[in-house]
Image (cartoon, rainbow, N blue to C red):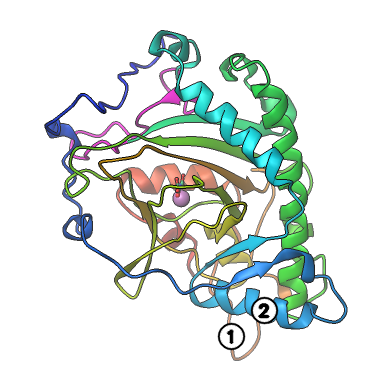
């Protein structure tokens, strides 16, 4: 198949915004607005399994995931020096000449590889973004031809990073079970072995009109959990709560973790998958790396037994292959989670 057209997101040299980048969503009016910071706790991940201080930290975690659907975590065991390496290989890749990056261009009909927009729809503005999508798990689903060989350490670092996030995800799935006083493996067992992981490097170049263009349109993630390594210096991510937008501060070395639709389902709606978006700025490019964790598409998920009670009836159907439901509904402009509700 021929590679999809990759025109780089116009940047730096562009003074006026190309028309197809003018965003007209309902939230467009708040793009350039000055907004409050989100009020979420920073969780010390190393305390979650501590016999003495664990309980309090678990309560903090649970309360943030219940009210906001997201937290920042520190002391997660992933070495800051390694995170810097991950950041560096991503930035080196985006810094390559377009011709070199195009070797890894997304193919028509696929979604993996390098591209700047995924949904080709006449009536939707393009996001002000360049992306590199790569499935990293299961390993036999890796499309290595789309994994950059330049910088040279890219593949090895992404492989190592995947293993570290996978471990973190397991620990988090156990922690939320303990926080809800459920059997420790109830979420992890439903998540299952042979799960999928998708990593996306996002580059938001400086934008001449951050009040008119959007970095990433409002959406919720279809994952179980999403692990975001933010840019160490540049803000841009915002979460919505009660129709208000809140900025996420940068905490170097921390991960932003948000609830995805599939944990909303498994938790029978106790944890809500939050709507978020990314805005741009005129001065500085921003790079982030997201890692989505999904159950294997053949695995059924549903609210865990302990969270369905007489006072809290079951709210979601048994689902399987949630990401294909995402695509179907996205094209119709609907949130896929609506399709999962009873
Ligand atoms: C995403 C996402 C946030 C960011 O890729 O789904 O929400 O800060 N990214 O890039
Ligand atoms: Ni997202």
Q: Which residue is mark 1?
A: 312
Which residue is under mark 2? 307
Name the outermost residue toward the bottom. Answer: 311
Residue farthest along the right direction in this orientation: 51
Look at the magenta stretch and give its main secondary structure: loop
Q: Nearer the viewer, residue 322 or 174?
A: 174
User: Where residue 304 appears, x then y in whole percent?
Assistant: 70, 70
Q: Position of residue 225 (x, y in %)?
A: 60, 56
Q: Is residue 290 above or below residue 310?
A: above
SS for dot 2: helix
Disc assigned to residue 84? none
**Dot 1 beta carbon under 8 Å from ligand 2:** no
Do the numbered discs 2 and 1 sit on residues whose CB atoms are within 8 Å? yes
Left or right of 55: which side holds 316?
left
Residue 16 lies in what quarter of the image?
A: top left
Rendering coords of residue 84 (x, y %):
63, 38
Rendered location of residue 280, percent (x, y): 30, 45
Upstream in sequence: badge 2 or badge 1: 2
Query: Can residue 267 be seen from the camera position used here?
Result: yes
Local packing at callout 2 (Cα closer than 10 Å; few below 14, some 14-19, many 20+) is some
Camera sees residue 270: no
Horizontal arrangement in the rendering, residue 102 relative to residue 69 (left or right)? left
Asked whether mark 2 lies closer than 8 Å to ligand 2, one says: no
The magenta-colored residue range is 107-128
**Residue 47 in which image quadrant:** bottom right
Q: Is residue 232 left or right of residue 58?
A: left
SS for callout 1: loop
Is residue 111 highlighted in magenta? Answer: yes
**Is residue 61 one of those drawn in magenta?**
no
Of 87 and 67, nearer the camera is 87
Q: CA distance from mark 2 to mark 1?
A: 7 Å
């Amino acid at each position: 198949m021929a590679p999809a057209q990759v025109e780089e997101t116009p940047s730096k040299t562009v003074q006026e915004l190309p028309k197809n980048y003018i965003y007209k969503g309902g939230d467009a009016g708040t793009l350039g607005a000055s907004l409050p910071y989100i009020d979420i706790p920073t969780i010390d991940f190393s305390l979650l399994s501590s016999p003495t201080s664990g309980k309090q930290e678990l309560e903090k975690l649970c309360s943030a995931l219940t009210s906001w659907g997201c937290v920042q975590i520190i002391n997660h065991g992933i070495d800051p020096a390694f995170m810097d390496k991950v950041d560096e290989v991503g930035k080196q890749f985006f810094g390559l000449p377009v011709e070199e990056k195009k070797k890894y261009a997304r193919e028509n009909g696929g979604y993996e590889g390098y591209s700047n927009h995924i949904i080709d729809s006449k009536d939707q503005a393009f996001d002000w973004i360049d992306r590199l999508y790569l499935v990293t798990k299961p390993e036999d689903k890796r499309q290595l031809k789309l994994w950059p060989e330049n910088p040279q350490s890219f593949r090895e670092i992404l492989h190592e990073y995947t293993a570290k996030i996978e471990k973190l995800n397991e620990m988090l799935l156990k922690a939320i079970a303990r926080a809800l006083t459920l059997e420790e493996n109830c979420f992890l067992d439903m998540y299952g072995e042979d799960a999928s992981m998708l990593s996306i490097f996002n580059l938001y170049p400086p934008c001449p009109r951050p009040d008119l263009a959007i970095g990433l349109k409002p959406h919720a993630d279809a994952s179980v959990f999403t692990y975001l390594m933010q840019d160490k210096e540049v803000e841009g991510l915002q979460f919505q709560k009660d129709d208000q937008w809140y900025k996420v501060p940068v905490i170097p070395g921390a991960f932003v973790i948000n609830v995805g639709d599939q944990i909303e389902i498994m938790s029978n709606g106790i944890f809500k998958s939050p709507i978020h978006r990314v805005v741009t700025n005129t001065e500085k490019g921003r790079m982030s790396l997201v890692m989505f964790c999904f159950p294997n598409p053949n695995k059924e998920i549903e609210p865990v037994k302990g969270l369905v009670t007489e006072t809290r009836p079951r709210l979601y159907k048994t689902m399987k292959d949630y990401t294909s439901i995402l695509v179907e509904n996205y094209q119709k402009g609907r949130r896929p989670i609506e399709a999962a509700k009873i």
